[in-house]
Amino acid sequence: MLQEKGSKIGKKIKELIQNFQKPEEIQFVHEDKKFDPYMDLCEFEYVSMQSVNEQSIQCYTDCIMLLKQEPIDLRKLSNILFKGDELKALRGVNWRLLIGYLMPSRRQWVNLLAKKKDFYVQYINEYIISKQQKQQNDHPLSRDKNSGWNSYFEDAQLWNKIELDTKRTRKQEGFFHQVNERKIYEDDNQARQDKKDSTPAILSKRAVEYNFDVLTRILFIFCKSNTKPYVQGMNEIVAIIYYCFQNDDCELLRQNSEADTYYCFNILMSQMRQNFDNSHLQDRIRSFGDLLQKSDARLYEYLMKQKIDLKFFMMQWLITSFSKEFNLSDTLLIWDAIFRDIDDRNDFVQYFALALLRHMRDELIESEFGEIMMKLQNLDQQKLDVNRIIELAYRLRKEYKK
């Protein structure tokens, strides 16, 4: 039944795409032939996608036509992302484009993905597997500065610090405590050893690897390759990217989910690094207070009367870009909106926070300190329409942005 439905949707999309193509460009394959709708460099074709339904056919087709352009117009692509869940079948490739990981020219995609995955596997060998091999050749009490044990203890401390957070990441939703069936480091011939050695102690102390182990590995390599410290909150950001990429309809992109998450996280951290700077955060919170007072003086004055310090909730919202406040499906919608803003993603986060408070204003004004804090620090337990809040955020930014 599902296959039949997918076939009907596929035929409809083909018909819509044909309306925009010249006759010589139409070279659809047989229905039973499987191919990759993202990575085919000649044309985007369709057999079936789990995330496409009859209501989203037109929106999906419009996006496919944009992705068929050479080069792809990222501004037009960002505008069509306003459709949110109607384009969830293309969310993975769209995020890679708007983050700046995939180039607007499709001709570069396949080679880029393969090379980046190879580089990432080399990072695993360099920072994890080779360290384990050096450790095995040393004595733990060796005073030699080049001893593998010297760096091993430092690395183990970093790994454990990261793992404390990744093990708790969205634990109630289950995904990150599911078994990871695709161990990327086993794809490299040089990394293939016997079963005992292929999973070094620093990589995981368990015989089974879970998705939160993947988060730990990505963050560990990020810290080592960039010589940057781990900061709490990074786990929430990398988790959303990995969840999106790992659950893509496209098999080729799922195969690259870990490596692509690492590189996209690197790009985002370069754009969001000030979010982890305390003085910068304080400035942004003060700026947000001025914006809230200008937008809704009554709500602002009531919060001040209740002794509500904006940093009690704004600090986390700004650091993580709302990556932990809502359930996964709502968070993906919020991040669709964040990535739409090519010029200043932090700017949209601020207006989303303003829209959120405006959306909740009536119940906040009817509450006192304890209840207000409970609501703002447990947004996933409130009955909130995320799509309406996103729309309000756009309207507020249009009204108040200088």
Image (cartoon, rainbow, N blue to C red):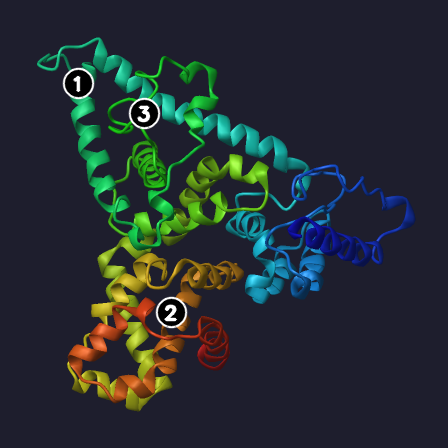
Disc 2 residue type? Gln
Write down the quadrant of residue 369 in the picture.
bottom left
Q: Residue at x 59, y 54 (%)?
A: 51
Q: Residue at x 46, y 79 (%)?
A: 396
Nearer to me, 318 or 128: 128
At which x and y percent is residue 28? Answer: 82, 43
Kindly give the residue lying farthest to the top in the view shown. Answer: 137
Q: CA distance from mark 3 to mark 1?
A: 13 Å
Q: Is residue 95 visible?
A: yes
The image shows residue 329, relative to residue 226, as above or below, that is below
Q: Residue at x 36, y 37 (%)?
A: 214
Kindly give the residue lying farthest to the front in the view shown. Answer: 1
Residue occupied by mark 2: 350
Secondary structure beneath dot 2 equals helix
Q: Are marks 2 and 1 in contact (CB under 8 Å)?
A: no
2 with respect to 69 (left or right): left
19 with respect to 88 (left or right): right
Disc 3 residue type? Tyr
The image shows residue 7, relative to residue 302, as above or below, that is above
Q: Which mark is residue 247?
A: none
**Among numbered discs 3 and 1, the one appearing first in the sequence:** 3
Q: CA distance from mark 2 to mark 1?
A: 45 Å
Nearer to me, 369 or 204: 204
Q: Is residue 402 visible?
A: no
Residue occupied by mark 3: 127
Residue occupied by mark 1: 149
The image shows residue 202, relative to residue 54, as above or below, that is above
Q: Are marks 3 and 1 in contact (CB under 8 Å)?
A: no
Nearer to me, 96 or 200: 200
Q: CA distance from mark 3 to mark 2?
A: 37 Å
